[in-house]
Image (spheres, rainbow, N blue to C red):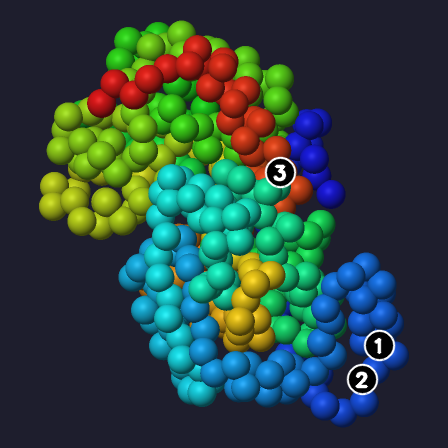
Amino acid sequence: MRTGFSRLAPLFFVLGTWVGAAGATAASPSPALLKAKQEAEAKGFIFETSHDDMVAKAKKEGKLRVLSSMDAAVLSPMVDLLKRKYPFIDVHAEEVSGSEAQQRLLLELKAGAATNWDATEASEDWYNEYPPYLKKFDILGMAEQGVLAINPRMVDPNNRNIVSMSSTLYSVAYNRKLLSPDKAPNSWEDFLKPEFKGRKFIADIRPFGMAALVPLMGEEWVRDYAKKIAAQQPIWVRGQSRGLTAIAAGEYFLSKLAYWHSCMGAAAKDPTGSLVCKVISPTPARLANTDAVLKTAASPYSALLWLEAAASREGQKIIDDYYPLKSNLFGQGKTAEAIKGLKVSVIDFGSLQKLRQWMDMIVAAYGFPKAQK
């Protein structure tokens, strides 16, 4: 497993087809399935050997309450998908967005007050603090054995009960009318050129994209690069929506490490056709929407079926349809197709635990800047 602390060999993704069986039924479990169950239970995990049994238990529960950081536009069709598959489940899904709301939820979990939800996101900002409040389903083991139709690479191999539904890629955004394509950066080092010094490009003070370069480039390279970026005197911003809108309007002409899906969405709505989203190698990426079943869930099996549905081909297509280029890079959606053959530096489950540490390191190298716009 990658730790992100050493320089790694370039990471090339080749899209393969993975099909989960989800076909372990009430028939006698195979020896391999029984062994997996025994090993999981010895470690304190819950392991179901039959998908049919899980569905039967969900039917007895009859309802589901989900708190998700997925966009509200995605949640409605995702609810419809689960209802089509399991019409006996009364589903309510609600969006929770922003770090403050997610931190408040974590505090409620610690206080034992968040008892009205069955599934939620283990927020990347406080990822290490969530496991004690999650139900110990061995989702990884059940996915590997085909009991759950989830690609095992979408499941945290350490905690075994957290599933990443989506991912985030990063790109360069620029205004083609203010910066000719031949002069747009082709590498991250290009941002260090003299012509880009002195409030010439936007940089986010919350450096998720910079942190995503660590697994491939290493801490030392990223720390040094962050100091050099600060010396370029960029325009510091907090968040990216405003910056992308400003670039499209011609207020600024260049942004470093913009969310690719946000940039592509803004470009599609740009009536001037001036906003360009350009992928630079290595392409930074991170797993997102890391969801799990809560320990206090009243409907844990319905929640398992929700996770399975969202991770399925149909669920990933919903994410692609309503949140383009946001599906999980290990799934069977458009993101996996988009990065095929690219060199990608990924904040995966192993390095998610280091994300806050790396972001703090980068902010310190930046010199603790404050948003200017």
Element on which disc 3 rests: loop
How much space separates mark 3 and mark 1, taking CA atoms?
31 Å
* Residue toward you, 327 or 302: 302
- x then y, percent, for residue 212: 53, 34
Tag 1, which secondary structure? helix
Q: Which mark is residue 373?
A: none
Identify the residue at horizontal 39%, vertical 56% (top origin).
70
> Can you tell which mark lies on residue 29?
2
C-alpha separation, residue under disc 2 versus residue under disc 3 = 35 Å
Q: Which residue is mark 3?
A: 353
Asked if the residues shown at circle 2 and circle 1 are in contact, with their CB atoms under 8 angstroms apart, the answer is yes
| Residue marked by disc 1 | 34
Residue occupying the point 23% across, 45% down = 267
Quadrant of the drawing holding the C terminus: top left
**Any part of residue 98 in sight:** yes
**Earlier along the polypeptide chain: callout 2 or callout 1?**
2
Residue at figure coordinates x 60%, y 61% from the top left: 295
Q: Please provide percent x and percent y for residue 238.
A: 31, 28
- For mark 2, give the secondary structure: loop
Image location of residue 286, percent across then percent down:
52, 43
Q: Is residue 15 above or below residue 203?
A: below
Q: Earlier in the sequence, mark 2 or mark 3?
A: 2
Q: Residue at x 54, y 86 (%)?
A: 60
Q: As shown in the figure, which amino acid type bears the numbered disc 3? A: Gln
Placement of 227 over or under 78, stated as above or below: above
Q: For label 1, count other residues whose C-alpha is less than 10 Å away and answer few (under 14), some (14-19) or many (20+).
A: some
